[in-house]
Amino acid sequence: MIRDITIGQYYPADSILHRLDPRLKLNGTLIFIISIFLFNTFYGYIAVTIFLASIIKMSKVPFKFIARGLKAIIVILLFTMTFNLLLTPGDVLLQVGFLKITRQGLHSALFMGIRLTYLILGSSLMTFTTTPNQLTDGLERLLWPLRRIKVPVHEIAMMMSIALRFIPILLEETDKIMKAQMARGADFESGGIIKRAKGLVPLLVPLFVSAFRRANDLAMAMEARCYRGGEGRTKMKPLRYEGRDGLAYIVLLAYLAVVIVISIFEDRLPVIL
Amino acid sequence: MQIVFDNINYVYSSGTAFEQHALKDINLKISKGEFIGLIGHTGSGKSTLIQHMNGLIKASSGGIYYEGQNIYDSNYSMRELRSKVGLVFQYPEHQLFETTVFKDVCFGPKNLGLDKLEVELRAYEALKMVGIGEDLLDASPFELSGGQKRRVAIAGILAMRPEVLILDEPTAGLDPMGRDEILGQVANLHKEKGLTVILVTHSMEDVAKYVDRILVMNKGNLVMDQETRKVFARYKELEEMYLAAPQVTYITNELKAKGLDINTDATTVAEAKEDILKYINN
């Protein structure tokens, strides 16, 4: 069940997108997210759709796999769209009882739907093509200037990568403890909500104990290797921009320029909705 | 036959890139009262195999029979099976959760739906079997030493009065004293109560000392299923699977190669000593 959630997962493949510098991908995602909130007409979304579709194609991640990430937000998506559709005041198109659909409502519902969908597709594409370690590395470098105002950038990045590293370990541990308790006749599936919540005690107590034990071991191991935070620390594989990253930045800037031009002139084009 | 495996196959995450054939056509018969050793290097499928025995993992294909009944029948009670086939996982002390030792051991029998008196009787009995003294009954399980914790965890399974006891590396990480104690107690249970025991271990010395029959797993296949000395006689094949025979086997074989006419199928030091003395006295 937990494995069905594909948002935030890494999908190993050999594509140009996988090889790009994580800093570029973080910046690109940011620009993409800004771009989907720029427009008020559909003309802009033509450019956004072309851009997104070609990037998905380049990433070599199957579209089916990416679309699965949308499952997690489908409820929120439908919820927002319905409310926008029914509760926006304006020119009435259709009225059934006290429910009215307005032109403005239809407009904002459609836009909200597109924006949320593209937001998820775009940002999950970043995590599909970037390993968690690269991601934290990139984030650390991008936030580096904040050190001047005493933000512990390295420590935050280290905490993030440790947390990410522990997710699969704790999942495995949960599975193991669950099986061990089932071997003692524990039942995690049947019964009412109170019985089930009580049934989790034999799972949660050992899980917490083991999480603390592992944290302790890790702290000890880091200390034994003289870890003392980010001060003066160098990297074995420092992030370096390559030729392809420069090219990708040019593409990104071109996209940004196109998007800005469209958003300036879109009001002069004939209105679709 | 107590446990029968009929052509068991198990495939992990089938249909994805991570697919793995963990068990291949396993056929196996285990009778009541046997003491069996299960060996194989890391990742050979030992743990997957034993988790099939009490229904924690369901085979992809094939059938498993416990006392003649198919455990995959829809009306077969898995809970009953798990009370009869007790499985002690690796590092079982990690599953302790209650506030006192006694309460933790009560967890298993309580899940069987027994009345309070019976539950407490069984827990008391099980703790006695593993040699945990009465002074520790009200201690927190987290305050005990490593060896004590492990014995409490084993008692948690024994309290369900299983007919088959499966132990997955019960001595990993224990000192020699703790190791001998635990295995000695298991051997006693086997002798006195006629318990069927399946011991998964990496220690060939332990296998040689206690076990009558050895199962060898390699890459998901059950490659050997013979009595102990016959398996160790094939020590060259074992080495190819990253396993080994007890040190005594190597010594007796070496002596024989040097021209001493002695038996090479001794598996323990005591047996080898007898053989060598016999040769010298002749």
Image: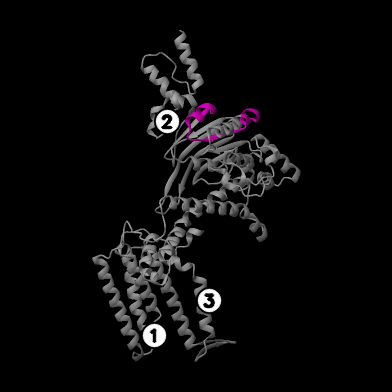
- Can you say which quadrant of the picture contains the N terminus of chain B? top right
Is B210 a magenta residue?
A: yes
Dot label at residue A211: none
Dot label at residue A41: 1
Q: Residue at x 34, y 79 (%)?
A: A46
Type of the residue with mark 1:
Thr
- Depth check: give the residue in front, A192 or A91: A192
- Depth check: give the residue in front, A227 or B31: A227
The answer to the question of whether label 2 and label 1 lie on touching residues, with beta carbons closer than 8 A, is no
| Structural distance between the alpha carbons of marks 1 and 3 | 22 Å
A94 relative position to A121: left or right: right
Mark 1 packing: few (<14 Cα in 10 Å), some, or many (20+)?
some
| Structural distance between the alpha carbons of marks 3 and 2 | 63 Å
Stretch in magenta:
B188-213
Pick out the residue farthest to the top: B282
**Chain containing mark 2:** B
Q: Residue at x 49, y 30 (%)?
A: B214
Label 3 sits on a secondary structure element that is helix
Pick out the residue farthest to the right: B117
Q: Residue at x 30, y 65 (%)?
A: A20
When asked about the image quadrant of residue A161, the answer is: bottom left
Is any atom of residue B76 visible in this view?
Answer: no
Type of the residue with mark 3:
Phe
The answer to the question of whether label 3 and label 2 lie on touching residues, with beta carbons closer than 8 A, is no
Type of the residue with mark 2:
Ala
Say which of marks 3 and 2 sits in front.
2
**A157 is higher (above) or lower (below) than A84:** above
Dot label at residue B244: 2
| Structural distance between the alpha carbons of marks 2 and 1 | 74 Å
